Amino acid sequence: MPRSSDEIAFVFPVLIVHDDDDFSVFDVFNRVLDPVEGPLRLIHVANVAGRMPRMAQICRMILPVVAYGDPVLRKEADDVLEGMEGLDTLIANMWETMYRAEGVGLAAPQIGRSIRLFVVDGSPFGEGEEGDAGCKDFKRVMINPVIFDESEESCDMEEGCLSIPGVREPVTRPVSVKVEYYDDQWVLREEALTGIAARIVQHENDHLDGVMIPDYAPALRKAMLQGKLKDIAKGKVPSDYPMRHPKNVR
């Protein structure tokens, strides 16, 4: 509701952006605002233009998750430069995309950006009396992360990946690690992680180096997975969230 008679109230949707969409913030308002006709039109246009920077900050988009087989998932990602234009919006969109897909982590290569950035929210694993204590309130943005001091002790656990819907494979990882990274305010941080939180971070960090969970499978199991992976790349495997599939897959 407008606070005064000369203000315009706006409703900001979350947009689902598909493969060939190319939205600007102007397109958003063309789609969601009723046109204003007559003498008030110029005032309306001026109001919209004046609010455009704030609107761009508020509007969030759900991006398609890049499917297995896309070359961007196999690249070694580039470092993020401080002051990178559009970084805050990218991070906000990654959160929206991850939650829409009901994931606990999402790396930038998974939405087609080959940069060293991922978001994680392991808090669902920390819920309840038997939850993993290290995952309670474990919500982070990690920019240019570096993992070190991996424990000698390791364990197996099944992992899934938003880029490989329907596939879960056991992966052996160190039980605990330390990670140094910049947060979304460009504060350098260091954390010691253990349990599921450590696993989530290692999984997402793998994406920044072009590594995916099938790479951990034994040779025979890897061969058995090829048919399913090819179907995923071709878009033949359904998912509950928008995906972008590589072109010209044979």
Image (cartoon, rainbow, N blue to C red):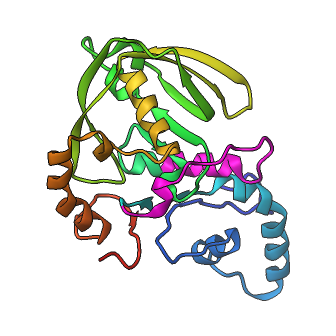
Residue at image position (34%, 28%) is: 124
Q: Is residue 225 left or right of residue 3?
A: left
Quadrant (top left/top right/bottom left/bottom right) for the N terminus: bottom right
- Picture quadrant of residue 66: bottom left
Residue nearer the viewer, 226 or 29: 226
Q: Residue furthest bottom?
A: 38
Residue nearer the viewer, 224 or 182: 224
- Residue 27: x and y, percent? 64, 75
Task: Inspect the magenta stretch and tell me whether residue 22 lies in it.
Answer: no
Task: Inspect the magenta stretch and tell me whether residue 86 lies in it.
Answer: yes
Q: Is residue 233 left or right of residue 39?
A: left
Span of residues in magenta: 69-96
- Residue 132: x and y, percent? 33, 16
Report the number of numbered marks: 0
Residue at image position (37%, 50%) is: 101
Residue nearer the viewer, 194 or 206: 206
Residue at image position (37%, 42%) is: 103
- Residue 4: x and y, percent? 77, 55
